[in-house]
Amino acid sequence: MADPVQITFLGGLGDIGRNCAAIESGGEVLLLDCGILFPDEDMPGAEFVLPDLEYLRDRADRIVGCICTHGHEDHIGSLPHALEWLSFPIYASPFTLGLIRNRLEERGVIDRTTLNPIGDHDRLRIGSFDCEFIPVTHSVPSGLISAIRTSQGVVLHSSDFKLDLNPVDGRRTDLARIGAISRTDGVRLLLCDSTNSEIPGSSRSETEVGEVLRGVFAAHPGRRLVVAAFSSHVHRVQQVVDAAVESGRKVATLGLSMKRNFALARELGLLTMPDHAVIDVADVDRYSPGQVCVVSTGSQGETRSALAMAATGDSRWIDIGPDDTVVLSSTPIPGNEARVARMINNLVDRGAEVVHSGQLDVHTTGHGKQDELRTLHTVADPEFFVPVHGEVRHLVAHADLAMKMGMAADRVVLARDGEQIELSDSGLANRGKVTSGDYYFVNGQLIENGRELFGERSILGSHGVVNVVVAVNRAEGRLLAQPRFESKGWVGGDAAKDLESLGADEVAAAVEEGLASGEDGDLERLVRRAAGQFVNHNTGRRPMIVPIIIEF
């Protein structure tokens, strides 16, 4: 009997983000990606969300490496945090490693790993795992499909993928190699991207966006073009650069990550342009508007992003005005719609014209739709299938698609974060939760996994806080001074002073009554109840009540 293989999903099955899985066999652990999730509006104050890395603590000395399939933050962003208390080598393409290196150096953990470059069609052993890397097209250069040969056969991980027949760099998803593996070794288990599993048809080619962008440049002579895109989307940036150079413009970058990734991509030959066309953003005002194109971060309206700051007039480098056309070459990530809309309003308010994907096809997805998923399933012809990378509805839709293609229901296994699947001689089974799969929130220097804090922050943000300070002599059973009733964010202006005074009287009466009757065992609870009833009765609001009891 061959050793079984377990795969534990530490993130990415239920969300578009924090992708991370641990493949275990023969006492060794191989990590597949280690990404973050960007917080939504229900997580106020959180910088980002980590996968359930706690599962790896007891297995720290067994981790033989981490394969990073591509350079998006939802696949590499947790590495700096994981390496603060773990140590393992990282395997990725040179571009992906360049992005990782920047983050590890910033965090001061570069010495806790070795960065091992891998190329298209490379095959190497990571511990006892025999790994082959196959080129795949996505919205970031040098993505890799992983064919991992284990004691239970080939585990094929699609990475994030699309089937673009005319990619900007000419590097297509190598379906022929996947088909060859299927015919020879066979694919025992397919783990496949589910992001667009609900959407019929096929995704548009990235080169089609280039045609639209050239049309935008041609339609706006004499105006400065500011194009916002993801800094890792080098193929999109290449097309912006091509359109700019063709129209006789100089190109400047805005935003630290755009500057870094632009330089890295040029260094690796992934982004090509003449040197004379590159200028520093500090020099853009030396040129007339029609001679300049600025490539910027901030297409998602992030609060401190380069474009969002320019939209509010807070940029150190550029002033947005009536001579600018701003192109948002992206679509809002779910949850970011309000921020993007607010940024567009700010840009328009400053006199700029804004072009976005709701008007023109200035963006295309990096994830395959249903027809592309069907093609990959057909070519791989897996024995078993687990949908990955998506919200619950995406995972379910992908499972349904596989079964409609003829795959038996008992060969399609749905899993969620924290659950472990086991591939053995008898087949594939979901063993259920072996770890919590919890969210771990990064709050400054702290990492926390409770959501209670966000409930408190939501109350503070929506209703404010009322502090009630009460001084008593419990031995004598008397109130020593008038309570202090102080609020922030509850009510404003003169009304606050009046209500705070009345609230102090209400609390004083309740405390004196409690002391006189001997029902003062829990003064904090008594004060909270009295203050809470007062503020709710008088304002209909429910601020956070913080009783502070001083006893003498």
Image: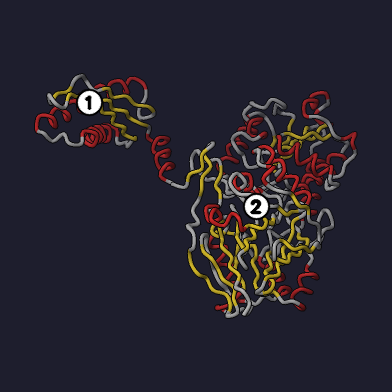
In the displayed structure, 149 sits above or below 83; it is below
What amino acid is labelled 1 in the image?
A: Glu
**Element type at mark 2:** helix
**Residue shown at the point (27%, 32%) measured from the top left:** 535
Q: Is residue 505 left or right of residue 1?
A: left
Q: Nearer the viewer, residue 532 or 433?
A: 433
Q: Mark 1 or mark 2: which comes first in sequence?
A: 2
**Residue shown at the point (76%, 60%) measured from the top left:** 136
Q: Is residue 539 left or right of residue 212?
A: left
Q: Which residue does the numbered mark 1 point to in the structure image?
A: 551
Give the colour scheme of this rendering: secondary structure
Instruction: Tell me residue 331's x, y (percent).
Output: 65, 48
**Element type at mark 1:** strand
- Which quarter of the picture shows residue 374? bottom right
Asked whether the viewer can see residue 131, the reply is yes
Crowding near the residue tagged with mark 1, few <14, some 14–19, many ≥20 C-alpha atoms within 10 Å = few
Q: Is residue 282 left or right of residue 313?
A: right
